[in-house]
Amino acid sequence: MKYLNNICKLFECNLGKKIPIKNKDKSMIFEDNTDFFSGETIIKIIGFVNFLHEKYKRINMPITFCFGNVKIADKLSYILFECICYSLIVDYKHIVHIYWNPIDNIQTDGVFSSPLKLLNKGNVKSLKEYLNKFKLDIYRDHFRKIVDGKQKEQTNYLGNLFQDLEIFLKYFNIDKESRNQISEVITELVGNACEHASSDCLLDIDVTHDHSKKVENIIQNGKFYGINIVIINFSKILLGTNIKTKLYSNNIVSTRYVDLFRAYQYHKTKFSNEYTEDDFCNIAALQDKISGRPKHDKSGGTGLTKLIHSLQEKSDMNSCYVVSGNHCILFLKDMLNYNEENWLGFNKDHNFMTAIPDEDVVVPCYAYIPGTAYNLNFIMRREDDIDE
């Protein structure tokens, strides 16, 4: 089964973070009593691992993570924890134990079908089960798969993935338009990871069902599914890396890219600690008909953010975002409207050419993510509850 490559870069890219360790019964203990598991927790865990590996080089001591009752911030938080545990077991040969009791939440219900629960046992058999479930788990309300980056050489691997997703989502009676949109978003993002970042890609979807939905504090009739998605790859190529290369190439010929370069000339006068060149390149990579592919006369992109916006309009959640490096872009509904030229400003004025993104859109991250990770959450009505 395929191994997700480059996870260990999480530790290498955050070497400045180190947290002292506790040693008990020949096991290294990580304890966190904040009752909230988030990106801040992830950077603490990375600091703990970095300190451990610095102090005990080439010693594969057992590691125990202790949290107690915790509310998990979002799906990406525990998926990153899964990746860390996987790397500790595979790359560093540690035995890993986890003691925690996650609190039930529609955005993070997938943790209860996560391979992390297998590490509560703390035996050799459960470690093997963990590795297998980490790589592939398609069962009922959970779709988990590692897509091999080398599959880009196969012409129809994304088409096959799209069909698999359609079949998986159809089981939940989600309306056909939404199924198509979700499947299209996922296949495009997986394709970007494999083809643009030249890396493997981890896809994880969980569906939580029979929830109610509120609009303006009024409970809506019918039953709804929470659809939680994480797509992540680990690579030295970040979301905006190839866009930055194009901006510096001085060989832009397509009108779309000429306009992009014109926008860049304005934005760079506004760069600061809060809004950087990397942020601009990330925003540019999300624009319609903009791609990091080498040929400048070939426009890419298929309106990814349009699809996300359309899905968010059907959802009462506003917790979709992308992380790359130490930069995060929040997909806020009110900021995802295009102007007449199909540029996305990520601001209230919907102005990309002469305005920078809203300060609530571009935010820093606790940890440096070597690659790109999407956290997407939607709530969809069951198809048999929709009036014909």
Image: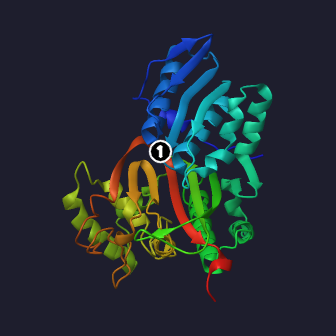
State the residue lying farthest toward the left: 269
Residue 193 in view (yes/no)? yes
193 and 32: which is toward the camera: 32
Q: Residue at x 64, y 60 (%)?
A: 207
Residue 335: x and y in percent read 34, 70
Q: Left or right: where does residue 264 sit relative to residue 64?
A: left
- Residue 108 placement (x, y as % from top left): 56, 50
Vertical placement of residue 157 versus 91, above or below = below
| Total numbered labels | 1
What residue do we see at 76% from left, 32% from top?
A: 126
Specify the quadrant that holds the C terminus.
bottom right
Question: SS of the residue at dot 1?
Answer: strand
Look at the image and name its color scheme. rainbow
Give the percent coordinates (x, y) of residue 52. 52, 19
Q: Residue at x 78, y 26 (%)?
A: 124
For this orientation, the residue located farthest to the top is 25
In this figure, which residue is indicated by the disc labeled 1? 369
Q: Decide if residue 73 is on the left or right side of residue 382.
A: left
Q: Position of residue 103 (x, y in %)?
A: 55, 43
Q: Residues within 10 Å of mark 1 (few under 14, many from 20)?
A: many
Closest to the observer: 117 or 144?
A: 117
Q: Quadrant of residue 177?
A: bottom right
Disc 1 residue type (three-letter): Ile
Q: Is residue 209 above or below residue 181?
A: above
Q: Nearer the viewer, residue 321 or 345?
A: 321
